[in-house]
Structures are given as structure tokens and as C-alpha cells.
Image (cartoon, rainbow, N blue to C red):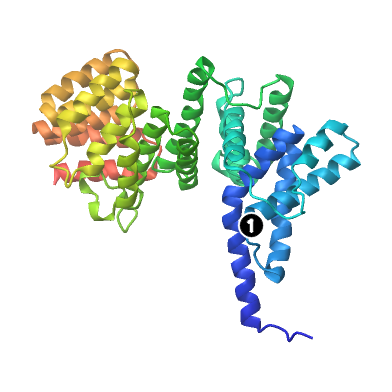
Amino acid sequence: MRPPAPVGAVAAASAGAARAVGDASVEAYPRIVATLIRVTGDWALAEDCAQEALAVALERWPADGVPANPGGWLLTVARNRALDVLRRATVERRKLHDLALLTPPDGQPEAAAPEDVVDDRLRLIFTCCHPALAIEARVALTLRTVCGVPTGDIARLLLVSESTMTRRLTRARTRIAQAGIPYRVPSGPALTERLPGVLAVLYLLFTRGYVVDGEPAFADEAVRLARLLDRLMPKQSEVAALLALFLFQHSRRDARRDAAGNLLTLERQDRARWDRAAIAEGLGALDRVRHDGPYAWQARIAACHATASSADATDWPAIARAYDALMGIRPSPVIALNRAVAHGYAYGPHAGLSLLDAAQAGGGLDGNPLAVAVRADLVARQGDRLWAAALFREAAAAVDSTVERRALLDRAAELTR
């Protein structure tokens, strides 16, 4: 009889197995779900079987050891579970036959071929982000199915109850089935038409995580998905541009607040705390961009900030030109506001105020506290400190975020000391 393992060794094995399950689930879970959806056409079954495979791994791996191919092991368990369910439900022979074809001849877990992973993951992303679904449903379905985020966590991130989120996900899957939304990646003109919708979902995810009071998990998942999409579609410039934009912005996440939790503007951040590896990765992605789309111009703007050694070294004329180009292809009140900021730093506060007046003339910035804060900053740089302080206080009274309100009031206090 083999002697029992020391308690410390058992605990270490359990902890190591739990880590292995967590690591494998990041890549394996979406692949398993995508594969089973393709074969069975049943979203709920695919997710349930993937979850059960992870639960079995947590039970067995501490005692049996982590398999050489964790992802293949999980896929085998999930597939076998799906096969059992289909047998019991007496589903049509074709589905059973197709599923059986995935079983390796020797019964050993296998690694899916790279092209299968590419096809299934891309199909899943494009299906979750189909324009027939509401934007909130696309976000939720992407988080749940592509990222494997638990329903309860998604509910908390989107500020709804778990039961509401469960119903929302169910309706989205039902909509896919009833509308006959194809589980495939479009090609030709259809791909060009659909890709912006996919990128818009990722952009929304990132934005929700990057705002001051946002949930960082959103930004983390958006970066991960952008990396995945870039790997699967390396020739799509706007995909590379979106990844670069995310990386440049996300590189500053640890420097955006001081030790007391106060918000720090870009010029006051400690640039030594910026993530240089993320910036380098972003520059590599940006170097592959060959077209001047909206994400490309935003990425170039972010690159100017990310590569400046100091606030004074920022190439504001280049940023101003980029915003000019961006306004030409995707005009919006927010872009116009940022353009005013860029011109104010590049060519002086008077130039910025002129563009700000023009941006506000259309009414698109009415009630926007950020527009008031921008005017306060430009007025302060013109030398009217008292008026600027009053504007900062006006902006502070209109924002919802406590952190932003404190930052704006601090700026007002600095000007009146």
C-alpha cells in the first residue's frame, strides 16, 4: 500500500490543481462551448457541459494530477457529457453521429486543430455580436459565452439582478434560434459590414471598465478579446488598431489614482508606473495598421500620450491633426470636445475656446459637465483663475462620480488659493 501523502503536499496539489483549472478555463471554456454549439446547436447544453467539465476537473485533478493536455481533457469530458445528454434525449442520429466523430480513436484527450479553434471562436464572437440582438444583449452574451464570466458576475457588472440577467441571456439565445442567426463568420462584403458591430461591443466593454467608477473586469476582458480577435483576424487593420488603443489606455490603469484614491489627470501621473510592456505591444499592433479608420486615429492619439516622456513633451500638434481627421470620418460632440482640448494645447487656449464654442453651438454637449470642465481648464490657462474656479465648481456639481467631483473641486481650490 502506498503511504499517505503529507498534508502539506495534498494542500499544494489541491492548490496547484485549482490554478490549473482556472488557467485552462480561460482558453478552454470558450473553445469547448464554441465546439459544442457548432455540433449540437444547443447553447444551454454547451455551456452546462463546459461547466460540468470544470467541476469534474476540480474534483479529480488534485488526486489524479493535472493532465498533460488540460484543454483536451476538459473538451473530452464536456463532449462525453453532451453525448450522454443527447442519447438520453433521443436527439436525431445526425447530431449523435457528428458528435461521435469528435471522439479520438484511442479515447485519449486531443487538442483541437488550430484552424478548428479559429473557426469556432470566430463563429462564436460574430454570433454573440449579431446586429439582430440589442447592444446590452450582445455584451452580456459575449461575456457569458466567449469569456465564460458567470451570470451572477455579469449581472453585478451591468447593474441588474441575476434573475434579470438569466432571462436576458435566455432571450438572446432564443432570438438567435428563432431568427435563424447563422453560426458562422461572414465573408466578403458581409464581413466588412458586420465587423464594426463586433468591434463596437468590445469598445463598449472596455469603456465600461475604464471609466472612473467602472469595473476593471470589463476592461480586462475587452483587452483579452481584442487580443484573441487580432490573433484570429491578423489582416484586419481596425482590429489591430482597436487592440493598440486598448493597450495604450490600459497601460495607465495603475497610475490614474494617488495613494489616497484621488483621480490624477494625465499630466500629473507618475509615468514610471505606466505598463511599458503593454505600450510596446500596442506599438507593435499599431505598426500593422494600414488604413485610416476611426480606431486607427484614436490609437494614434493614444500612442502620442503613451510615448511622451513627460506632459510637456506631448506632440499636441500631431494629436490635433488626428482629431481633425477623426472629425472628418466620425463626427460627434465628444470628438469635437476632445478636438477643442487638443487644439487648445497645440495652438493656445484661444484656439481651443473657439472650437469649444463651435462644438457647443449644436446643443450636443448641453448639460455635459466635461464640456464645462474643459472650458474651465482653457479659461485658467488664459489667466482668469476666478472664472475658471467657478466653472470647475459648476462641473463638479453636475457629475455623478464622487471621485470626479473631488478632483474638480480640488482644481477649483488650487485656483483660489
Q: Residue furthest left?
A: 383
For the N terminus, the image quarter is bottom right
Residue topped by disc 1: 70
Going 21% across and 34% down the picture, which residue do you hit?
390
Residue at the spot x=75%, y=84% of the render?
Answer: 2
Image-quadrant location for residue 313: top left
Rendered location of residue 173, percent (x, y): 70, 30
* Nearest to the observer: residue 179 or residue 215: 179
Tell me if residue 3 comes above or below residue 101 in the rendering: below
Q: Secondary structure at mark 1?
A: helix
**Residue 344 horizontal/vertical position (percent):** 16, 28
| Side of 29 where 245 appears, left or right | left
Quick check: 4 left or right of 214? Answer: right
Q: Nearer the viewer, residue 26 or 169?
A: 26
Would you place residue 367 above or below residue 265 in this image? above
- The residue most toward the top is 362
Residue 335 versus residue 325: which sits nearer the camera? 325
**What's the residue type where badge 1 is placed?**
Pro
Query: In this rendering, would 101 be left or right of 359?
Result: right
Residue 270 visible in the snapshot: no
